[in-house]
Amino acid sequence: MSKDFEEVIYRPKTSWRVYFAVIFSSIGGLLFGYDQGVMSGILVMEHWIDYFNNPNAVWRGFITSIYLLGAFVGGLIAGPISERIGRKRSIMGATVIFWFGTSMQTGATNVDLLMAGRFFQGISIGMYSMNVTVYQSELSPAHLRGRAISFQQFSIVFGIMVAFWIGYGCAYIQSDASWRVPLGIQLAPSVVLFFGCFILPYSPRWLCSKGRTEEALQTLAKLHANGDINDPYVRKEFDEIMEQIRYEERYAMKSYKEIFRSPSTRKRVFLAMGIQGMQQWIGINAVLYYAPFIFQSAGMTGTLPSLLATGVNGIVCVIFTIPALLFIDKVGRRKTILGGSIGMGTSMLIAGALLKVYPYVEDGNNNTQAQYGAVAMMFIFSASFSTSWGPTGWIYPAEIFPNRARAKGTSLATATNYLMNFVIGEITPVMLDNIKYGTYFFFFATNVVCGLIVYFFYPETKGLSLEEMEILFGEGSEEAEAIKAVAARTYTDAEIPQDTGIKVSPTAQQASSSSSEEKANEKAEI
């Protein structure tokens, strides 16, 4: 294949529609991030503490993390629902559940109602997390896919930042509105997301899986070639999708059990679940959920100073997600994660050492510089995560699966994320109360272990189309060889295969003679 054609095929003129759909759908990530951030601020508000009778560390952990159990459930049910009704309709369905859960929390009169609302809201968050990343991956060209899915992480940290500052402002309110207002505000962006979904395109890969091939081709053309169905990139992408769909007609995966049948798919499930689980064990949500308590333990006493430091931490997360948006498709997934692990592990080690030698003692003789140094390490930790594990933890699971297993595989990975997230939410306040500086050493160790796992077991995926992942993971399988043959074709104004039922414009030209022969062989096999 000539260099000119490679440039045409792998660097399509992606239209504004792709960017709009990717950015707009990431409102689901904003809602997830906002919920994470808002609770960390509410937990230290005097009126919330008084209203719910000053819950201890165990109860604080459970109130914070029960929504993660809901997200675990939402992540599991998201796969089958998404396969049936599509990605964008699943996002809309999640929004309805989100409204229900948020309303219950905002109007809560007791702990039981508060936790029930958080559980239902969690179900919607689990559905968002799986569907948004899959939707973004399926709409984006290979060379922009990392950037596209990184918008999910950017929205998450932006939501966290907004929640921190809203919480800081509302902390001055001397009534129960100080915590009810931050909870209720999140209904506004969810309404925008629901009604905006009506104008978003369906995923072309989902359309093909439902036999709506003409609509899928037209959608690909609008997304990547200003409506030209004979564009070389559109033709190549469509042919790869159809090649995989033909294979999937014979080897459909109708249950979670079936995705473990194939060694290739089973390996990808473990990699996806692993990276999402590790994203939690490296400690980021321990910092995000309990940032005010962490800053208080480092000497920033009082509700407002700790909330202010938490708000600054949110700004750090947003700023340092931007490099991932710009460079992750150039640097790659592995190098990005490994660099982040070094920064995160080092900052946790230094913070733990400072607080071990110079612990904060109330009304005692404290080393303020050392304690503020520990606070600075938390900012470095958050910055390192935001450029690495944050976006990559969502990118990897959404891009490695074949179409027939993408929803279910990503669903399992998402459920793993929230199950581990729940565990971290439960144990962090207990660790902070009991082992104090040892908490930082614990997360230093987990960063080292997780970095080594990625180094030895995770292959690089940048630059491959979703279908070409089969070449990387398929290990010479029939499907991998078929995709490889399509990827090797020379495309000009390629003809549209006869079996799609789509009419070809009179000006459409034939592909190369070798490509025509391959198509004839494929039809004979079918």
Image (tube, rainbow, N blue to C red):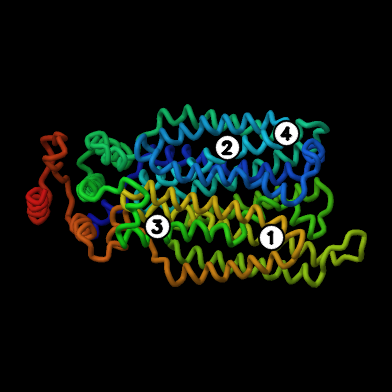
Is the residue under label 1 in contact with that under label 3 (CB below 8 Å)?
A: no
Q: Sequence order check: which comes first, mark 2 or mark 4?
A: 4
Res 269 label: 3
Q: Can residue 199 be seen in this view?
A: yes
Q: How far separated are the C-alphas under marks 2 and 1?
A: 28 Å
Q: How far separated are the C-alphas under marks 3 and 1?
A: 32 Å
Residue in view at x 55 percent, y 52 percent: 419
Which residue in the structure is indicated by mark 2?
A: 121
Q: Can residue 388 be seen in this view?
A: no
Q: What residue type is labelled 3?
A: Val
Residue 210 locus on image (x, y percent): 27, 37
Residue 72 locus on image (x, y percent): 52, 47
Residue in view at x 92 percent, y 63 percent: 364
Q: Sequence order check: which comes first, mark 2 or mark 1?
A: 2
Mark 3 secondary-structure assignment: helix
Q: Which amino acid does label 2 sit on?
A: Gln
Q: How far separated are the C-alphas under marks 4 and 3?
A: 40 Å
Mark 4 secondary-structure assignment: loop
Image quadrant for the N terminus? bottom left
Res 15 label: none
Res 110 label: 4
Q: How far separated are the C-alphas under marks 2 and 4?
A: 17 Å
Q: What residue type is labelled 4?
A: Asn
Q: Sequence order check: which comes first, mark 3 or mark 1?
A: 3
